[in-house]
Amino acid sequence: MAKGMRDIKRQIKSVQNTKQITKAMEMVAAAKLRRAQEAAQAARPYAEKLKEVVASIAAGTKGVKHPMLETRPIKKTGYLVITSDRGLAGGYNANVLRKVTQTIKQKHTSSDEYVLFVIGRKGRDYFRKRNMPIVEEVTGIPDAPAFADIKSVAYTAVKKFEEGAYDELYLYYNEFINALTQIPVEKRLLPLEEVGGDESVASYEYEPSPEGVLEVLLPKYAETLIYSALLDGKASEFGARMTAMGSATKNATKMISDLTLTYNRARQASITQEISEIVAGANAQS
Amino acid sequence: MSTFLLEIVTPERKVYAQDVDMVIVKGIEGELGIMPNHIPLVTPLRIAPVVIKKDKRQEVIAVNGGFIEVRKDKVVILAESAELPADINVERAQSAKERAEQRLNAKRDEIDFRRAEMSLQRAMNRLDVKQRQS
């Protein structure tokens, strides 16, 4: 009996240690989540402004031609997937990766028909293990990503489309709904959909020309969309991690109380047994 | 004298938002001085200092890779990065400049060349802005 008790005690100790870790991770994620949300908020004016200007050019000048607005027959598809570097974030990575894999399986028969851009170590390892064609990967994105961190992958993704390496580009990431809910979403990034032309357009002068301005703006716009998706993804990551670690902590607490109960029962039983042994011994002597 | 609202926005944050008298930028086609009631205009910008005039004082901001949108009552500069002189790290800019110069001298590769050129421009821009301020 005494040995059983020692085992239980050891188990309690180990669960307690785990609980401490998950608890700490939960709190760290909560703090980072707040910051990530602020960053996503701060990035919004830029993206909105850019969209506004692009829309007003598109609406103000009819028949602007730009390779990024053209719909071509689809021969090859590009996917840009945003995952995290670290695990222990619940279904965060699994959900988005599952969605990508499903789509790819449905739409393509061979791996010549698509290419992948991956942000995050988890996604990279996943695709690499399955021998899927990765064009470019970025890992080690800091928790508060700067635009410069993804500039090069965004630039390549947009550039390759313009060059005709693929005919559409999809973006996959976890959309942040709230701290408890993150939904993996698929967005078509390129060719750019008709950017909603609202009527209240001031007629601008363009220097050097509307096409010239569009030439500069459209790639920037696409890059910005990628950046805001990344920020959203970061917020989702911390949300998911916070929730996962929260429930892990809760489970640990429950386990500890169960184990403590078992331990106490075992202790009680051993005491009772000892007493009855002593009593039996005393009775035998008299 | 009338003023207008100038906003400088980067993907990371809003760097500047104040009423100013005049702003001078370097567009693709040349320098532009923008005063209130300018005709609506959109143009990409070169990597260059943006000069802001306000109450007889002058401010300089290092703007990189952006464009300007002029409206009747408001001017917005959208840029990949924009730094006030106080935010500029001189040592970093200096070393970036040297690195870029080395690369320009050494390599003949097309893309590398373009890239080095851009980073040289950015570094010079930052140093320029810092110098003007002091």
Image (cartoon, coloured by chain):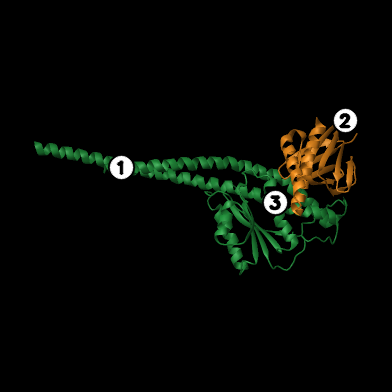
Chain colours: A green, B orange
Q: CA distance from mark 2 to mark 1?
A: 82 Å
Q: CA distance from mark 3 to mark 2?
A: 41 Å
In the image, are marks 3 and 2 on the same chain? Answer: no
Query: Which residue does the numbered mark 3 point to in the structure image?
Result: A152
The image position of residue A195, as x and y in percent, is 77, 57
Q: Amino acid at mark 3?
A: Ser
> Quarter-wise, where is residue B79 in the image?
top right
Quarter residue A115 falls in: bottom right
Q: Residue at x 61, y 64 (%)?
A: A104
Crowding near pointer 1: few (<14 within 10 Å), some, many (20+)?
some
**Foreground pick, A32 / B37:** A32
Q: Quadrant of residue A258?
A: top left
Viewer-proximal residue among B7 and B30: B30
- The tag earlier along the polypeptide, 1 or 3, is 1
| Chain name for mark 1 | A
Q: Are marks 3 and 2 in contact (CB under 8 Å)?
A: no
User: What distance separates the C-alpha of mark 1 from that of mark 3?
Assistant: 59 Å
The residue type indicated by label 1 comes to Met
**Which of the chains bears the disc numbered 2?**
B
**Which secondary structure lies at badge 1?**
helix
Q: Position of residue B23 (x, y in %)?
A: 86, 39
Q: Which residue is mark 1?
A: A5
